[in-house]
Structure formats: structure tokens, C-alpha cells
Amino acid sequence: MITLIAAVARNRAIGYQNKLLYWLPNDLRRFKSLTTGHTIIMGRRTFESLPKGALPNRRNIVLTRSIAALPGAETFPTLESALSACRSDEKVFIIGGASVYRQALPLADRLCLTEIDDVPVDADAFFPDYSDWQVESVEEHEPDERHAYRYRFIDYVRANDGHQEAGQMVNGKW
């Protein structure tokens, strides 16, 4: 199963100058909970942006054409070659960046997104359009002392089985 996981602004912005746009402790906790014990695939720049390198308790795969070793990570030149190295029963999470998300979206089974109710002033990386995906579940969160914006954890599936369409209001909210 291939899952894309990201935090996205209302305009689908995900980053600026190779950094995340938002610091949301609950999003980071959810990311860790969902990906621990599984495989994560990322581009080289995403790997380089990780403050401590390879993420612990996960199989780290980095897409790069470089032959340089990346401590704690396996490297592959393409997404296809990386996915070929994964077992069929392996849970794979695509964690960025923008070009890797674009390549992986047609192959994905689900999206685990944190949608932030904000449009950043500066952004140079964007998540691909997912308006044809179907909402599976939503968990709303209001701003608090650690989270400056409203956000929601929202999981999408590809199948059209009567669920709410992406980008539409859910439960009377955005």
C-alpha cells in the first residue's frame, strides 16, 4: 500500500526554501505514529532537510542520482526502482518533496493529509491536485496555544464509493 503524507495549506503549499511551512506538534505526532515501523520514501532534498538525518524506526529510502552514501538510508535513482525494492505487503509512505509527490500520486492508494486553514505569504513547493480523491475520515482541530491555525487530519482514498469529494466542505466546515 502506498500512502502520501503531508501538511498542506489551503493553496496546497507545503514548503518554502526546503523547509516546512508550519510547526504543528500534533501533525508531527501523527506523522510519527503513522510512519513508525514502515517504509518512508523521500527525495534527496527532503532527506537533507531532516534535522537529524534518517528517521528512526523506519526504513528510509531516498531518491537520488548521486552515488554518495546517505547514513541510515537506502538510495535509488527513481521512484519505480525504489518501489520495486519494497515487498508487496510493505506499507510505504511518500513524505516529499513536491516532485516525488507528483510522481507518486498516480500510484497511491491513500492520502493522509493535515490541511491547514491558512495561505502562506511565501511558498515554493506545492502538493499536487487531489480534488478527485474521496474523503474517508476527518478530524477537526481548532487553534490552541501550540497551533496557530485551524487544521484537520483528513484521509482520502482513490475509490469513488459515495464519500465526500476533496475540496468540498465537510460537516459544514471549509
Image (cartoon, helix red, strand yellow):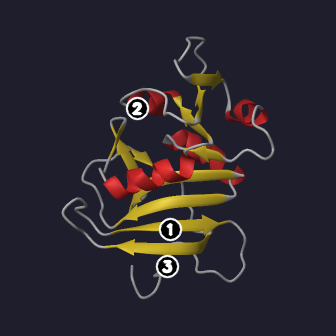
The residue pinned by badge 1 equals 154
First reached walking from the N terminus: tag 1 or tag 3: 1
Look at mark 3 in the image and give the residue it sits on. Answer: 168
Farthest-out residue, top: 68
Q: Which of 2 and 38 lies nearest the eye of the viewer?
A: 38
User: Which x, y percent locates residue 165?
Assistant: 58, 77
Q: Tell me residue 82's x, y (percent).
A: 70, 32
Question: What secondary structure is found at the residue carrying circle 3?
Answer: loop
Any part of residue 47 in sight: yes
Q: Which mark is residue 50?
A: 2
- Cα–Cα gap, marks 3 and 2: 33 Å
The residue sitting at 68% across, 29% down in the picture is 78
Q: Spatial distance from mark 1 to mark 3, Cα to Cα?
A: 12 Å
Q: Secondary structure at mark 2?
A: loop
The image quarter containing residue 166 is bottom right
Crowding at dot 2, Cα within 10 Å, few <14 / some 14-19 / many 20+, comes out as few
**For the point 27% across and 48% down, which residue is it?**
122
Residue 106 sits above or below residue 54 on the image = below
